[in-house]
Image (cartoon, coloured by chain):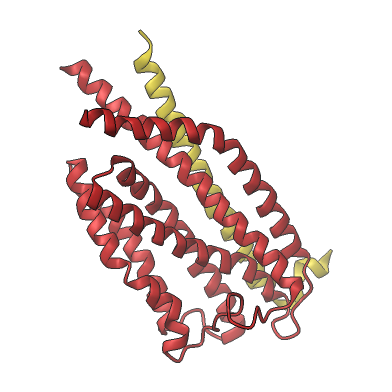
Amino acid sequence: MASLFTFANPKRFMDLSAVMLPWLAGATAVTLGAGLVLGFLSPPDYQQGDTVKIMFLHVPAAWTAMMAYGLLAVSSLIGLVWRHPLADVAAKAIAPLGAIFTLLGLITGSLWGKPMWGAWWVWDARLTSFLLLLFLYLGYIALWNAFEDEVRAARAAAILALVGAVNLPIIEFSVDWWTTLHQGESIFRTGGPTISAVFLWPLGLTGLGYTLLFATLWTIRIRTEILERRVRSLLLEGAA
Amino acid sequence: MSDILAMGGYAAYVWPAYGVTVVLLGAAIAATLRAYARARARLAALEKP
């Protein structure tokens, strides 16, 4: 019975995701395309000039990187507590994507910081905690690769993911808790957004586009991992 | 045209930001699709009687 339970969920995921994938991919293309075009055509900011265009690349990347880590932590918790096999697969599938979005956030931030702050990098709370996010993703990937046994690897990596989740609120509130060069929240704040609508629209669309792109790639990566596991179990059966 | 290229004097920052975004996201998409295709091919080969 236990094997029936463990097998039923990946099966259901494969069926459901096969139906959803074309829609996810289509919605990604539309929102990301529209957001990037609108962002590219947006007027120069009265203070920042054309560097404001970097916002449409930097903010969505950073947002997606943090959301992905939140999902990594939740998946890890479910995998750790309920031993749900799909949760371990889902967590493992996030890490490389999260690392790429984090790297994008760091690089585009640096390219924005140089002309606006006069420095590629400063060791302040927001930037340092965000760099730590990259190391958490890389450490998570390294831990997975350090174990032969899948179950032990998933458990060790899940513990790292949960410990590292402390860093998420630190990133989020770093701009309020410490003095920093990085600007504070200007979108999801009480009293409404403080940025102009000509920038808010493209930013919202690229934010949605990045989120959907992540969801699409995450789904494909989970499917890949499920197929790989099926291949491994078939090979084991064949060898036995 | 040269106005767009110049980016109001910030070309050296704006264009690399677009470039690195296209390269990294493109690489993530390509790697994900390649791994998926490979897994499907391996499974199809094994499931063939």
Chain A tint as drawn? red
Which residue corresponds to the image point at 25% horizontal and 25% vertical from the top-left?
A233
User: Which of the 4 image quarters holds residue A164?
Assistant: bottom left
Q: Residue furthest front?
A: A1
The quadrant in which the N terminus of chain B is found is: bottom right
Q: Is residue A155 above or below residue B5?
A: above
Residue A27 to residue A68: above or below: above
Question: Which residue extends farthest right?
Answer: B1
- Residue B17 percent coordinates (x, y): 60, 65
Give A125 or A7, whichever is nearer the viewer: A7
Whole-percent x, y for residue A34 in the image: 73, 55
> Is residue A203 placed above or below A181 in the rendered structure?
above
Residue A32 falls in which quadrant of the image? Answer: bottom right
Which quadrant, please, contains the C terminus of chain B?
A: top left
Chain B colour is: yellow
The number of numbered badges drawn on the structure is 0
The structure residue drawn at horizontal position 38% and vertical position 65%, both measured from the top left corner, is A134
Asked if residue A151 shows in the view, the reply is yes
Left or right: where B12 falls relative to A114: right
Residue at image point 52% right, 54% down? B24
Is residue A99 at least partly visible in the picture? no
Is residue B15 toward the left or the right of residue B42 in the image? Answer: right
Spot occupied by residue A89 in the image (x, y as percentages of width and height) = 33, 43
Q: Residue at x 46, y 46 (%)?
A: A218
A83 is higher (above) or lower (below) than B2: above
Specify whether A223 is left or right of A1: right
List the single residue furthest toward the bottom: A179
Q: Residue furthest top?
A: B49
Name the spot of residue A52 as percent of width and height, x first: 68, 75
- Relative horizontal placement of residue A239, taking residue B9 as reference (left or right): left
